[in-house]
């Protein structure tokens, strides 16, 4: 039980935004309310993930935390993460936090620009400091100063926040990997992000985590707080080859930490309808549902989308992603993504 995330009545009340008396009423009146793990003198103790599921069924406001993963780079992973964050904010009026765990820092640069990132990095105000603290046994990570509020180069996007990444994560991850404390590092290294972000996670409707293109300790930190994940991919052989390994690895990790992490689906990016390989690969992925379902919405190959990675001020998301169906594709993807997650 020591590895489980446990909470009491007052924490449940805070999670749901109600008083403790309301939680007591739920326990009395709702037969499906989760049973406590143990009854202490101070009150009952529950498993957090069971309470979160119950609250979602009651449509209470609890953050939806989703990781974005692929073992191959250049497949549209980061662009998908940022586009979903911006669409959820502007088109669906959601408050979104982007957590950039990828050492390439692409999501960070897309949302705040290189100049601002260099300033933050020089002051140690990135997630690299969080992991470096664990290695150095220090407590210098400042969540409030690191959190960048109301980011994006799009004027209309007003409710996206960011925890920025750093190139220093490359060295940090290698060092963390050299000292694994047990199977899947569940006792300590994979819990660093969860403990650090716990004070703010429930402030958001959605938390999107851009993971590195591997299944190392930093990626496991992202999965540790996620209820599910998506896999953006180009529909070709090399980009989809690692999908079964991702699904199996996440399933094994989920079993290890006693938390469900659901594969919400594969997102097809950089699709070219005239390329036979793309058409055949999508057909194969849709037929082979044992790994993960495939989103109905596909994102086309587009030079305009590629240019959206540049941090240049624009007024609208349509300007940023394109006028020839690209904006509509991302908007439709966000709508489908939201339906799946909230189902």
Image: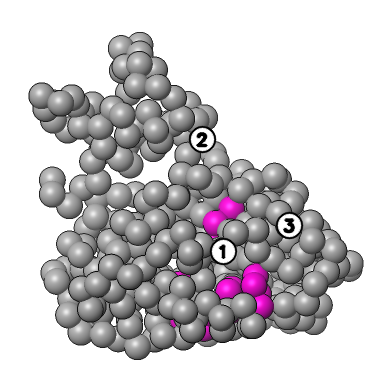
**Could you tell me which secondary element the residue under label 3 belongs to?**
loop
Tell me the residue at 28%/68% (across/down): 139
Mark number, residue 61 = 2
Q: Residue 70, image x and y in percent?
A: 48, 74
Q: CA distance from mark 3 to mark 2?
A: 21 Å
Q: Is residue 121 left or right of residue 37?
A: right
Mark 2 residue element: loop
Mark closer to the observer (3, 1):
1
* 75 vs 43: above or below: below
81 and 193: which is toward the camera: 193
Residue 148's tag is 1
Could you tell which of marks 3 and 1 lies nearer the N-terminus?
1
Q: Which residues are magenta?
A: 96-113
Q: Is residue 122 left or right of residue 157?
A: left
Figure label count: 3
Q: Nearer the viewer, mark 2 or mark 1?
A: 1
| Image-quadrant location for residue 110 | bottom right
Answer above or below: position of 21 versus 216: above
Most extreme residue toward the top is 29
| Disc 2 to disc 1: CB gap under 8 Å | no
Asked if the stretch drawn in magenta spans residue 84, the answer is no
**Location of the N terminus (image quadrant):** top left
CA separation in Å, label 2 and label 1:
23 Å
Q: At numbered mark 1, what does the secondary structure look like: helix, strand or loop?
A: loop
Q: Earlier in the sequence, mark 2 or mark 1?
A: 2
Residue that appears at 55% across and 45% down: 205
Which of these two is toward me, 204 or 142? 142
Residue on which disc 3 sits:
157
Crowd around label 3: few <14 · some 14–19 · many ≥20 (10 Å) = many
- Residue 336 seen: no
Q: Position of residue 307 (x, y in %)?
A: 77, 81
- Residue at the image position 30 percent from the left and 49 percent from the top: 259
């Amino acid at each position: 039980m020591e590895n489980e995330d446990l909470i009491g009545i007052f924490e449940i009340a805070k999670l749901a935004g109600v008083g403790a008396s309301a939680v007591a009423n739920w326990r009395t009146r709702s037969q499906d309310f989760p049973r406590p793990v143990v009854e202490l003198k101070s009150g009952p103790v529950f498993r957090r993930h069971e309470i979160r599921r119950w609250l979602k069924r009651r449509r209470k406001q609890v953050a939806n935390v989703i990781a974005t993963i692929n073992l191959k780079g250049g497949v549209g992973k980061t662009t998908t993460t940022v586009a979903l964050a911006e669409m959820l904010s502007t088109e669906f009026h959601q408050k979104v936090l982007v957590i950039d765990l990828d050492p390439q820092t692409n999501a960070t640069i897309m949302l705040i620009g290189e100049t601002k990132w260099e300033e933050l990095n020089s002051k140690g105000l990135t997630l690299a400091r969080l992991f470096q603290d664990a290695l150095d046994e220090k407590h210098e990570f400042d969540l409030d100063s690191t959190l960048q509020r109301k980011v994006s180069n799009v004027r209309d996007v007003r409710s996206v926040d960011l925890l920025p990444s750093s190139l220093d994560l490359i060295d940090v991850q290698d060092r963390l990997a050299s000292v694994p404390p047990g199977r899947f590092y569940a006792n300590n290294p994979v819990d660093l992000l969860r403990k650090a972000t716990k004070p703010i996670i429930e402030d958001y409707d959605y938390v999107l985590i851009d993971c590195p293109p591997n299944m190392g300790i930093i990626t496991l930190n992202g999965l540790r707080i996620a209820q599910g994940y998506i896999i953006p991919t180009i529909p070709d052989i090399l980009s989809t080859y690692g999908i079964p390994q991702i699904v199996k690895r996440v399933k094994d990790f989920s079993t290890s930490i006693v938390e469900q992490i659901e594969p919400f689906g594969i997102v097809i990016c950089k699709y070219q309808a005239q390329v036979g390989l793309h058409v055949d690969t999508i057909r194969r992925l849709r037929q082979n549902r044992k790994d993960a379902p495939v989103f109905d919405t596909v994102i086309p190959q587009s030079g305009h989308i590629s240019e959206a990675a540049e941090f240049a001020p624009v007024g609208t998301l349509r300007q940023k992603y394109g006028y020839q169906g690209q904006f509509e594709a991302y908007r439709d993807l966000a709508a489908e993504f939201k339906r799946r997650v909230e189902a």
